Amino acid sequence: MLKIIISGLWKDKFARMGMIVLAVIYLAILFAPIIAPYSKDYSDRSLAYVPPSKIFTIDENGHFSKPYTYNYVRKFDENNFNVYNIDRSQKHYLKFFSTGEDGKFHLVTVDKGGKLFLLGTDINGRDVFSRILFGGRISMTIGFLALFVLFPIGMLYGGISGYFGGKIDTIMMRIAEGIMSIPSFYLLIILASILPAGMTSVQRFLLIVVILALIGWAGFARVVRGMVLSIKNQEYVQAAKSIGASDLRIILKHILPQTTSFIIVAITLSIPSYILSESGLSFLGLGIQQPDASWGNMLKEAQIFSNIIYRPWLLTPGFLIFLAVLSFNLVGDTVRDILDPKSKD
Amino acid sequence: MEILKYVLKRILQTIPLLFIVSLVSFFIIRLSPVDPLAELKLNPSVSQETLQRERERLGLDKPIGIQYILWAKSFVKGDLGITSNGESVAQKLKERIPNTLLLTTLVIFLTWIVGIPLGILAAVKWKSPLDRILTVLTSIGMAIPSFFFAVLLLIFAVKTGWFPIGGLTGANYADLGFWGKFSDITKHLILPVTVLFTISLAGLQRQMRGNLLDVLDSDYVKFARAKGVSEFKVIFKHALRNAVNPMITLLGFEFAGLLSGAALTEYVFQYPGLGRLILEAVMKSDINLVMASLMMGAIMLILGNLIADLLLIFTDPRIRTGGENA
């Protein structure tokens, strides 16, 4: 089945584009420590809000040259506003595949004394480009992890509810509906806000995964239940029952596997909403916390007017979220078309 | 009579739902180690008597089960307690809920006016370049994070100066005449409505397109075509009515999605709605306010679904007569 999906995806123009974009993003975050010129925590407080470094390949005499860049020097103007000017006194040549300032191997760094901020720096003088790569590790995996937590729960819950029917079904479904009746984002921020302060960043990351899963399982369980209702009366289930298979075995071994293709579709279609939820949460300051980076919490700085007007490079994570979600949607739509040719939606 | 019975049944069904919602939200909030009155105690303008009254109303010295019953009792009576500023929670909600309803109903109205025809168009011209362009556009619309789009529109507003930034009313709102007030509110609404409209339009258009395509594939449509009914009549007289019914069920879901989506948008635009209220309450750990606005959000959502179901009675005759699996 996997083969059919992948070859089908490759045939579709949009899905292929989506897959390439996602592959680039995931490779980039996988090799973040090498690709990023700086570490996640590198910070130079004297270089807050430095604009992106300009890279030159043609020197002032019009000749081709090894790529080089200039540093920025800070000046205060009369409004006490930071202004950075290019300091043309010293060229800094780029170095490829060599050790950087931190003594580690990097894809690209710059000569000693030079600074290479491909996408500028933030308020703490941290390199935005490097943080985007490290932040992507969180933003692009949190959705998958949440789905891994919620899918087994939703499947089992929906499976049990649909299989037994009657009173059990009524009660279980009422509870699921109750959770679905709370506007999900309200529930999300409330759950995030009761997380105790002073957790390690790993703990916080895992708890946010759990919260995202808590929000999503109910709706999923309801759909699984509907499918189980229609499967459970088929002859082979009756046959399994008559030879004395236990209820749990029937649910796990005979009924739930029938829902596989629906589940694949549901997974690919719901990853984007988890990416968006995490970024929204972190944007509000309730998700991933500083000094850790995620695309959402990097955008937190975009809440300040002067930032979005004078420092547009701080908006890059937003475009990346858009690109990632768009790619997932394109791939997801095509996967659905392949597995469920009847739906033309 | 049948209809009345059905309506009554649906209304009665919401009661256990509300009970579960209240139970879930009450215990979630009590999971938090925050003292519900901590903020009130810190506020010097709140008198000791008020504090004592709140303590009794919430029954903080009693076991948690009793606390829930006390809270539920006072909620049913309409006493929602006071915020950490000592204002009445009920009053605060009364100010904010209409604003959120205004925003969401306006967005739903606009998305239906635009999304349904676009969905029909895409289905009728299935696999044409137009259909493909619409699919690409809706993919883009669905992928923009609402808060990011809101931020981009804010930049636009600041740079052009065409739109007021933030809030629902201008500084001189109180002095304006009726039309002045109307245009003031309209100007403030344009940006938040644009954000939510763009994001929910995409889903609606796709759904409509999918539904109509499914119906156009059905036997009775093929039969009508074979009989020689004109294509226009096939679509507008036969297919459309069946394709729209599931959309009405979706109306409830759309409303739910909008309530959630509106929270971030309201936050970015400083729009005085329920979503921003709950966000501010959460940040200040204002327990009374969080609890009450959570319940109000759930009630609005349940009512939205109820209205959608009731609307279906009028559009789908099968529910009127059978009503079994409705």
Image: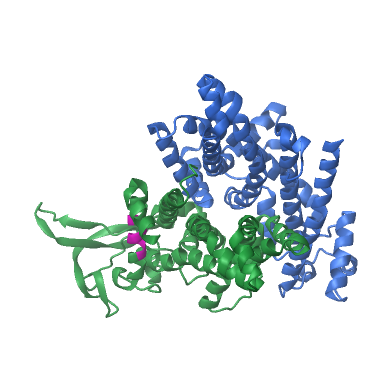
Residue positioned 28% across, 59% down in the render: A53
Colour in which chain A is drawn: green
On screen, residue A55 versus residue A81, left or right, reads left
On screen, residue B173 versus residue B237, left or right, reads right
Q: Which residues are magenta?
A: A20-26
For the N terminus of chain B, give its image quadrant: top right
Q: Nearer the viewer, residue A72 or B311?
A: B311
Q: Is residue A139 above or below residue A223?
A: below
Residue A215, by quadrant, is bottom right
Residue A45 appears in the figure: yes
Q: Position of residue B112 (x, y in %)?
A: 60, 34
Q: Is residue B177 above or below residue B135?
A: above
Residue positioned 26% across, 73% down in the render: A106
Residue A119 appears in the figure: no
Q: Is residue B123 above or below residue A228?
A: above
Residue B164, by quadrant, is top right
On screen, residue A178 versus residue A292, left or right, reads right
Q: Position of residue B313 (x, y in %)?
A: 75, 36
Residue positioned 32% across, 60% down in the render: A24
Colour in which chain B is drawn: blue
For the C terminus of chain B, give its image quadrant: top right
Tell me if residue B35 is in the magenta stretch. Answer: no
Q: Nearer the viewer, residue A326 or A223?
A: A223
Q: Position of residue A186 (x, y in %)?
A: 66, 58
Q: Nearer the viewer, residue B162 or B286?
A: B286
Number of labels in the image equals 0
